[in-house]
Image (cartoon, helix red, strand yellow):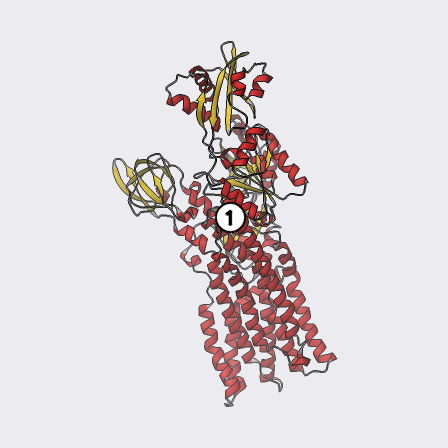
Amino acid sequence: MKREAIIQVEGMHCANCAASIEKTLAAMPGVLDITINFSSNTANLVFDTDVISGKKLTETIGKLGYAVKEKQIVFDIEGMHCANCALSIENDLTKKDGILLFNVNFSSEKAFVSYNPLIISDAEISDVVQGLGYKALYGQRTEEAKKKTSYRDILIFTLALSIPIIAITHFSDILYKPYLLFLMATPLQFISGYSFYRGAYYSLRSGSANMDVLVVMGTSAAYFYSVGSTFLYDGLLFYETTAMILSFVLFGKMMEEITKGKTSLALQKLMALQAKYAIIERDGKEVKVPIEFIRKDDIIIVKPGEKVPVDGIVIDGYSTVDESMLTGEPISVEKPVGSEVFGGTINKNGYIRIRATNIGADAMLSQIITFVEKAQGSKAPIQRFADRVSSFFVPAVVIIAIAAFALWYFVFDSTFIFALTRMIAVLVVACPCALGLATPTALTVGAGVGASNGILIKSGEALENAHNVTTVIFDKTGTLTTGNPQVEEFSSHEALALAASIEQMASHPLADAIVNGASRLGLSFQEFEDFHTVPGKGVIARRNKDTFFLGSKGFMEEQGVYVPVEGSSKFQEHEEKSVVHVAKDSAYVGWILVSDTIRPEARQAVWALDKMGVSSWMLTGDNKAAAVAIADSVNIKNVISEVLPEGKADEVKKLQENGKNVAMVGDGINDAPALAQANIGIAIGSGSDIAIESGDIVLVRNDITDVPGALILSKKIYSKIKQNMFWALFYNVLMIPIAGGLFSSFGLTMRPEFAALAMSFSSVSVVSNSLLLRGIKIKK
């Protein structure tokens, strides 16, 4: 069978890499066509799966020294009735070749999938899910799909039959009463109960058992016993029991559906922010187009009161923009020419023209939505406990129900009817859904609350790790400071011009500060033949036969350059500034003093962490005295100084070895290894750059007071998960014995229909408890 796959290839560094892969794969039998685009790192393959497998192609690419990048998508799953349905889908899909990760969130009805597109396609994944009795929708949902499976209509139908059945059973002695009840109860059993029968069939077919199995067994026992009493033998009728069980279960499902819909309200609001149309300039004319037709660098006109359609740069005009829906910050932001604006925000009162920069999936709003969807589709480690319990819960309940019947009828000599009702009550009172909903509902609501406040949590695992954090390490530059240093003073124009000429080939904050400082003074720049950086120390450049050095005092001394008294002592080491020295060969040329500004909110963030019992540390490459001075200004007591970029991860590891649960806060660029090493990496977002791979948590607002905010949110969510878990376990431990008749000697029993009502409200109570997270005030 012919298959076409578009894949991302990792590890290509030049066009020769692409040519090498293309040549090797094209020569393989079964490969019909291959095109590799080095600029986008993509490969378009057409191959015959009867001749060569996607797995073989993946292995071949790996042997060449490259890798097929896994594809990640979020499916909408329809047709699930309980958490065991989600577990059943996961168990089946994770066994399929090519699927690396498949997490289903029953609460949000979404599945997060990571897979190898060479081995399996999204359409094939959808087909597998459909074969299990559910629907998996990916991409733009249809109008039909947007209307979630509604229990309202079937509940109305059920009540229309249940109410007469109950009335006739208890208040009427009409002729042929059993036959009339049979005629009314039969469509009820098989039409109202159809979704449960269907769910039970697919569940048992896949080798598991879910809530549908319990409902079907309970209602079927009551119904078929009643049918026997009607036609075969003289016995009691339980048609009203079946009717009330189905009515209460469907009512509970409808309430659960409504409350579950509210858990993802924040995500729905984010999706609603996306503009549908934009006015762009094309060929000198203003044209209104759908945002899907906007191209990068298009000029877009945004009038007062309109939504900014895509990310862009203001090229003309001035306005203030409401960004609260993305960042949670209520104050509108001024946007002069040169400012960055983001799709989904609202232009308040000015006319602006913007140049489109990030469109489609690259836009900030799209990235936030994807981030939140992935978080909601992930699992916290604590969920594994619920999954383990759920996997044997239904079989255990069936065994308990049968045991209850056998003990009451054969051992305690109770009537058949009493034993039967005990069995039915146990079957319908047990609730695996409450346990299954405990974690995903809290995670779904919490991730939405975080997104509304500019805090993006990448996964359930990140959430669980964050609530245990005992130590927060702040990288200095760009985290505790603004990351926009300025030249404050210099020894001579010659030193500044020379330093700027060298630094124009570099890309880091100090280099930008020196180049900008020289440019403002109109100094002329020179060209250099060679340039390379010594990480954490300085720069070496060459021109003609001369070698130039730029960096710290220690770096100068390593190069055999003598730093005169003025250059080493004019500025005391305890000042919150950096001194960059310049030398030509062994001759000292001069110095440049560069200062960075401490973030105004830094002290407040450290104070908040201290109040939470979390210790704050600062990590920097600065000398000890200068580092201590900056730390003192924000009230940080613990300082790790003179650390090279490659040594930051080691310092994090040392603290972890001392029993610390560490969160590392940085910009995700030069401190990426440290962010990855920490128990939690917190990346400070900047503008549209929020998809920072190293961060477990991303702070969109570029505001470090959100660091304690993120930890508070994680603690609240985790606490809510534990509350839900306790309630779900407590409910089942309490209700199953009552339903089984354990306390009947004290007059405490439970009718099957009321057992169904209790079961329904147990799930609703868990979801409602999770919804309380929407009221938390992170900043407070």
Give coordinates of residue 728: x percent, y percent: 60, 64
Name the residue located 63 percent from the left edge and 35 percent from the top edge.
Answer: 651
Name the residue located 51 percent from the left edge and 61 percent from the top edge.
Answer: 79
Q: Of 689 and 751, which appears nearest the observer?
A: 689
Name the residue located 45 percent from the left edge and 31 percent from the top edge.
Answer: 484
Give coordinates of residue 278: x percent, y percent: 32, 44
Quadrant for the N terminus in the image: top right
Asked whether residue 719 appears in the rendered view, the answer is yes
Residue sitting at the far left: 285
Q: Residues within 10 Å of mark 1 (few under 14, many from 20)?
A: many
Residue pointed to by mark 1:
709
Q: Of 464 and 290, which appears nearest the observer?
A: 464
Is 146 on the left or on the right of 534, as rendered? Answer: left
Element marked by disc 1 = helix
Q: Toward which corner of the image does residue 49 lie, by quadrant?
A: top right
Name the residue located 58 percent from the left edge and 66 percent from the top edge.
Answer: 212
Asked whether residue 2 appears in the rendered view, the answer is no
Residue sitting at the far top: 545
Kind of residue indicated by mark 1: Gly
Residue sitting at the far right: 411
Q: Toward which corner of the image does residue 51 lie, by quadrant?
A: top right
Is 611 on the left or on the right of 490, as rendered? Answer: right
